[in-house]
């Protein structure tokens, strides 16, 4: 536990190298701008798709650090690529970050930003760079630029336009902005140093900072036909927003020298005060049995392999939400995996483990028979019904009890009956020879003894017959004199809720379905969805969309938020009670 300057107790913080950096900056007063929060981070998605579990890690890192150090995290849309971006994506990203439990508001102020809000400033800074000799308009074709860039280990070649006078570049840049040229005719490039085209880091070889793109932008409409590149926009947006630590994934490590150069240059030019933001990189999340690339997720949607971005098998935030994941489970998962500086793989069971740990204390219990077999209590009066009850949660008696009737005809699980029992099988089996049938307790009900079965024309068991012992009802005096080893769940056929239940499993059968660029479609799990009709205890008729339950013995289930109707819930299996996958793979 730690205390802050207001002497309020902060939750214990899981330490990691990013937090160490933040704490060192705080201790040194590096970013003690007057009036600004001590820590300002940002989460900068491009609005070109739905967020996935990998983004959740970045969200938890950025918003989590801001929260824990009394700072703020900005939600910033990096919307500089008009062709691929849409309002639909902006909306879902806003929804997903909120649902995950984070806010970009601080002291009544909203910190929802768009890089496109900075287009004027970005443009002014580009003019400055040209004037100061740090940028030039290149008129080579895209192919020429690519060829002249060189390769890793081979220097690039200077553009013939590299030394064109600043005034000429400036005029061309203004004409680009005015719409006088077609896409690709000219491009604005940074000139970091005289020999930058020989820089070992390819990102420093006169990187493009503005290009012509005659395209409609989802926010600025047709106001612009030149758009700033990501590597140019990102550091400047960070500096405009006074970001204290710009936290991103490792693939941006090679972009950091340009980030630093650009902000140092603009700061020397009077655009920003020191200290400017600094970038720090952490390992991205690679999770087994899923793919976390927007492009590949889009392919699953476009080829209708899944029902949409929110298909419960998808590792998108909207998919996980519909599947029944809680924001707390995802946060717990992100806490447990921590942050590191080296890429690695996290096993899906870690995510499922966090989910079970979160749901177990929360989820009310309920009974569901997923693979029904009829059970008839021969000596139970017809049309008679008796109340049975069970705690809503076995560890929290204060949450009350649920009631359900026992009647003459019940549904039990098919696996709770065996015509010829194997050794150690304690559930229902019929009399064999002189030996009586097995005795089994119907949970929260009566002890029964199997007396026979009905068979259909094909010889399959269609119903199990039992008789019950009137003085054996659970919770009544003397009921414990019946010693039975089998204890099974059931629902009354007369009052059961017949419901569609969707049994979801992992989307891929291979741990790293897209490793080494292989065809991930080939690794799809054909059994990732099974739809069944199940019988649920009567209270489930009232289940509301998004309500989660533990169906005893089966796992955690949620009333589907899209397809459930009042009085007619559809349930998704969120996860089984135990990690059955490890066993299944053997
Ligand atoms: P994708 O590769 O799926 O398209 P992206 O990186 O292009 O993802 P952005 O919208 O640019 O998507 O991502 C926003 C932020 O989320 C970035 O800072 C990025 O580093 C981070 N991010 C994306 N994927 C992961 C991941 N798997 N683990 C951690 N952070 C991630
Ligand atoms: Mg990206």
Image (cartoon, helix red, strand yellow):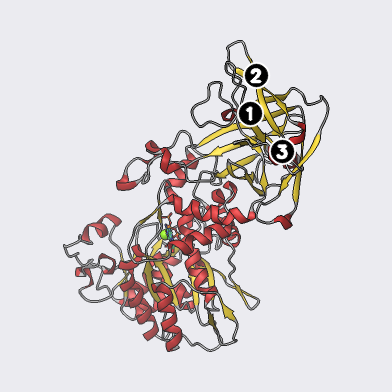
Does residue 78 appear in the picture of this structure? no
Secondary structure under the numbered disc 1 in the rendered image: strand
Q: Nearer the viewer, residue 239 or 305?
A: 305
Relative side of 561 to 170, left or right: right
Task: Give the spatial CA distance, label 3 vs label 2.
Answer: 26 Å
Q: Which residue is mark 3?
A: 537
Query: Quick one: label 3, few (<14), some, or many (20+) residues within 10 Å?
Result: many
Relative side of 446 to 506, left or right: right
Q: Nearer the viewer, mark 3 or mark 2?
A: 2
Mark earlier in primary sequence (3, 2) = 2
Q: Nearer the viewer, residue 422 or 358?
A: 422
Would the CB of label 3 be found within 8 Å of ligand 1? no
Mark earlier in primary sequence (3, 1) = 1
- Indicate the quadrant containing the C terminus: top left, top right, bottom left or bottom right: top left
* Quadrant of the picture in which ligand 1 is shown: bottom left
Relative side of 34 to 17, left or right: right
Mark earlier in primary sequence (1, 2) = 1
Picture quadrant of residue 520: top left
Does residue 268 appear in the picture of this structure? yes
Q: Which residue is mark 2?
A: 452
Q: Which residue is mark 1?
A: 372
């Amino acid at each position: 536990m730690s205390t802050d300057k207001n002497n309020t107790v902060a939750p214990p913080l899981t330490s990691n190298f990013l937090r160490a950096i933040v704490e060192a900056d705080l201790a040194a007063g590096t970013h003690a701008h007057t009036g600004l929060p001590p820590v300002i981070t940002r989460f900068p998605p491009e609005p070109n798709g739905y967020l996935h579990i990998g983004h959740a890690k970045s969200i938890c890192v950025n918003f989590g650090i801001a929260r824990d150090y009394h700072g703020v995290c900005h939600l910033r849309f990096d919307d500089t690529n008009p062709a691929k971006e849409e309002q639909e994506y902006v909306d879902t990203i806003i929804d997903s970050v909120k649902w995950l439990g984070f806010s970009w508001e601080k002291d009544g102020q909203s910190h929802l930003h768009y890089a496109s809000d900075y287009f004027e400033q970005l443009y002014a800074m580009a003019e400055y760079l040209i004037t100061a000799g740090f940028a030039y308009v290149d008129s080579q074709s895209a192919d020429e630029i690519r060829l002249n860039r060189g390769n890793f280990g081979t220097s690039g070649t200077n553009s013939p336009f590299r030394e064109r006078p600043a005034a000429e570049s400036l005029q061309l840049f203004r004409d680009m902005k005015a719409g006088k040229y077609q896409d690709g005719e000219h491009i604005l490039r940074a000139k970091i140093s005289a020999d930058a085209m020989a820089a070992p880091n390819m990102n420093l070889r006169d990187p493009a900072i503005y290009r012509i793109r005659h395209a409609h932008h989802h926010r600025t409409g047709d106001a612009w036909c030149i758009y700033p590149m990501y590597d140019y926009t990102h550091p400047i947006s960070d500096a405009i927003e006074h970001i204290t630590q710009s936290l991103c994934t490792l693939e941006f490590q090679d972009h950091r020298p340009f980030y630093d150069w650009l902000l140092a240059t603009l700061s020397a030019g009077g655009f920003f005060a020191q200290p400017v933001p600094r970038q720090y990189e952490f390992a991205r999340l690679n999770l087994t049995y899923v793919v976390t690339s927007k492009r590949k997720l889009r392919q699953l949607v476009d080829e209708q392999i899944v029902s949409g971005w929110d298909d419960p098998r998808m590792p998108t935030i909207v998919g996980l939400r519909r599947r029944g994941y809680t924001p707390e489970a995802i946060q717990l998962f992100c806490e447990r995996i921590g942050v590191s500086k080296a890429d690695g793989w996290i096993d899906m069971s870690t995510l499922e483990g966090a989910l079970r740990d979160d749901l177990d204390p929360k989820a009310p219990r309920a009974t569901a028979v997923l693979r029904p077999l009829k059970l008839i209590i021969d000596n139970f009066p017809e049309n008679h019904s008796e109340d049975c009850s069970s705690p809503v949660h076995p560890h929290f008696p204060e949450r009350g009890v649920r009631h359900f009737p026992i009647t003459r005809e019940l549904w039990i699980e098919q696996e709770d009956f065996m015509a010829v029992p194997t050794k150690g099988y304690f559930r229902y089996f019929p009399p064999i020879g002189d030996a009586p049938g097995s005795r089994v307790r119907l949970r929260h009900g009566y002890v029964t003894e199997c007396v026979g079965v009905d068979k259909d024309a094909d010889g399959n068991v269609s119903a199990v017959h039992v008789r019950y012992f009137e003085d054996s009802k659970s919770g009544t005096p003397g009921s414990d004199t019946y010693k039975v080893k089998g204890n099974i769940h059931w629902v009354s056929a007369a009052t059961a809720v017949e419901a569609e239940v969707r049994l979801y499993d992992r989307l891929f059968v291979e741990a790293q379905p897209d490793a080494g660029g292989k065809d991930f479609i080939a690794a799809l799990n054909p059994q990732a969805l099974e739809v069944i009709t199940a019988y649920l205890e009567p209270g489930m008729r009232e289940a509301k969309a998004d309500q989660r339950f533990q169906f005893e013995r089966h796992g955690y289930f949620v009333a589907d938020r899209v397809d459930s109707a009042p009085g007619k819930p559809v349930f998704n299996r969120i996860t089984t009670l135990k990690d059955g996958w490890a066993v299944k793979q053997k």
